[in-house]
Image (cartoon, rainbow, N blue to C red):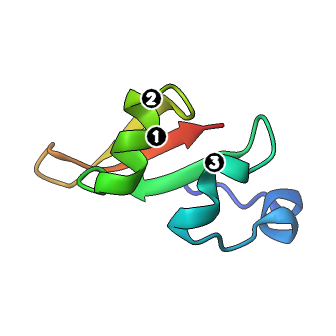
Amino acid sequence: MLFRSQDLVARAVPVDEGGLADAPAGALIVSNTENADTNALVSSGVLKKVADIDELDGRPFFVVLQR
């Protein structure tokens, strides 16, 4: 099932890894599971893991994080 939420598309902005800690509270971030910068922000409590996005073989590849 494909969702097309135009209100989210209109509000999406690219952010480099250096600006993730300054993202607005409640912001959702999609990152690769192996990204050292986002993993460090999760470990320090700046970001919270919300969900994994799996590859077709079932392995997590992306992660949804919340500020």
Q: Are marks 3 and 1 in contact (CB under 8 Å)?
A: yes
Residue picked out by circle 2: 44
Label 2, label 1: how many angstroms apart (C-alpha)?
Answer: 5 Å
**Which amino acid type corresponds to the residue marked 3 in the rendered image?**
Ala
Q: Position of residue 63 (x, y in %)?
A: 40, 45
Label 1 environment density (alpha carbons within 10 Å; few <14, some 14–19, many ≥20)? some
Q: Visible in this render: residue 1?
A: no
Residue picked out by circle 3: 21
Residue at 38%, 54% in the rendered image: 37
The image quarter containing residue 55 is bottom left
Residue picked out by circle 1: 41
Label 3, label 1: how many angstroms apart (C-alpha)?
Answer: 7 Å
**Which amino acid type corresponds to the residue marked 1 in the rendered image?**
Leu
Q: Is residue 19 above or below residue 51?
A: below
**Which amino acid type corresponds to the residue marked 2 in the rendered image?**
Ser
Label 2 environment density (alpha carbons within 10 Å; few <14, some 14–19, many ≥20)? few
Residue at 72%, 61% in the rendered image: 4
Q: Are marks 2 and 1 in contact (CB under 8 Å)?
A: yes
Query: Quick one: SS at disc 2?
Result: loop
N-term mark: 3 or 1:
3
In the visual, does 18 lie left or right of 3?
left
Q: Position of residue 26 (x, y in %)?
A: 76, 35
Q: Position of residue 51 (x, y in %)?
A: 44, 33
In the visual, does 42 lie left or right of 24?
left
60 or 36, nearer to the observer: 36
In the visual, does 28 lie left or right of 50?
right
N-term mark: 2 or 3:
3
57 or 67, nearer to the observer: 67
Label 3 environment density (alpha carbons within 10 Å; few <14, some 14–19, many ≥20)? few
Query: Quick one: SS at disc 1?
Result: helix
